[in-house]
Image (spheres, rainbow, N blue to C red):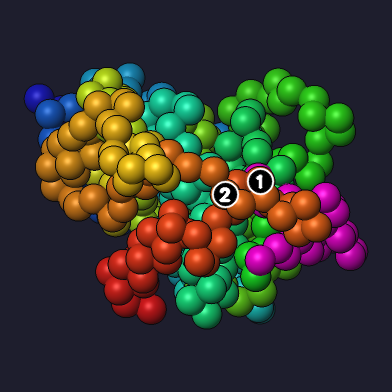
Amino acid sequence: MLTEEQVLKALETVQDPHLNKTLIELGSVKEMKIKDKLVSLKLAIAEPGTAEQMALQQDIVNKVKEAGAESVGLRFEKLSDEVIQKHGGAAEEEEEKSLLNSDTTFIAITSGKGGVGKSTVSVNLATSLAREGKKVGIIDADIYGFSVPDMMGIEERPKVVGERIYPVSRFGVQVISMGFFVEDNSPIIWRGPMLGKMLNNFFNEVEWDDLDYLILDLPPGTGDVALDIHSMLPQSKEIVVTTPHATAAFVAARAGAMAIKTDHEILGIVENMAYFESKTTGEKEYVFGKGGGPKLAEELRSEVLAQIPLGQPVIDEEDFAPSVYGADHPIGKIYTEMAQKVISKIGK
């Protein structure tokens, strides 16, 4: 059985990249949990939320797995100024303006597989929260499949002033996306560390207005970007999107399991494409089956926040936004109720 002593031994050679001292010398290990070869660590480092943290966390994961762990969960916080100064670093005179150091509530929208409408849920939850008077931002963190600007009808690009990027605002929502920085819809062929650096830039180099909520439209599944988000945002909330189909719900359970293992709070489940309602008869047809959302909620010990039917927003050619439902649209009203539930659950 893997012991705490073995984990600490494995970390003896791992150094903080900014202080060039080992994590053991710095007393970086603040919490450790070991269960069935799953190791969960809370670590204090000199500069969390940086690109260097990406390389550090990979080194830690490799070392701990070599010691016998099968899975490693990491959370990071900042070392105290006293410890940083003691070991040759300089305490920050003023804390860097970053979302990671703010009171913003992060809500990650995730799914087990693509094609379930996760981005549609993201943009409509964001716009519905804005209609409720909240200051909202959205990061299109689906780096390979960015779609938020097109879905919201955004044609302009963010402004860059000095070293700061100013997000584009649409429907009262501040938006940043990889799509703004790619020409001609070119494919992204970056690997994990570069993706992590881009996400870090979105948190630290974007001049967000004081936000109540930041929605993160994550890629489907449990790959590099999802892992980076879980490491960067130890206090994130999550909403898992599925369809009623049993297979989609089964796959989505993996994304929910990742949230639970990294101590993220699951706010609830959204069952998208839950049914089709005939305008003529009012009859509901369950095109993709029934029961996937409630079954997933039961498995993850959560609740169904909304069951959203198949539908099409009313397209306004003068104010084009092909995926955003108006407040008076029947599906828009469902998103309004969902936003109100989210506000009530979070309490702000």
| Quarter of the image where one finds residue 69 | top left
Rendered view: 148 above or below 245: below
Q: Is residue 91 above or below residue 139?
A: below
Amino acid type, mark 1:
Pro
Residue 288 appears at what percent x and percent y? Answer: 31, 26
Secondary structure of the residue carrying tag 2 is loop
Tell me which residue sits at (12%, 42%) in the image: 298
Residue shown at the point (40%, 43%) measured from the top left: 280
State how far apart marks 1 and 2 are (Cα): 7 Å
* Count of number-bearing discs: 2
Q: Residues within 10 Å of mark 2 (few under 14, many from 20)?
A: some
Where is residue 59 drawn, in percent x and y?
A: 47, 30
Q: Determine the residue positioned at 41% across, 26% down.
A: 113
Residue corresponding to mark 1: 322
Inspect this view and state whether residue 84 appears: no
**Could you say whether the residue bearing mark 1 is in a helix, strand or loop?**
loop
For mark 2, what is the residue? Answer: 313
Q: In what quadrant of the picture does the C terminus appear?
A: bottom left
* Circles 1 and 2: CB atoms closer than 8 Å: yes
Q: Amino acid at mark 2?
A: Pro
User: In the image, is residue 109 part of the stretch drawn in magenta?
Assistant: no
Magenta residues, start to end: 151-171
How many neighbours does mark 1 have within 10 angstroms: few (below 14), some (14-19), or many (20 or more)? some
Q: Residue furthest front?
A: 280
Q: Is residue 300 left or right of residue 318?
A: left
In front here: 90 or 45?
Answer: 45
Q: Earlier in the sequence, mark 1 or mark 2?
A: 2
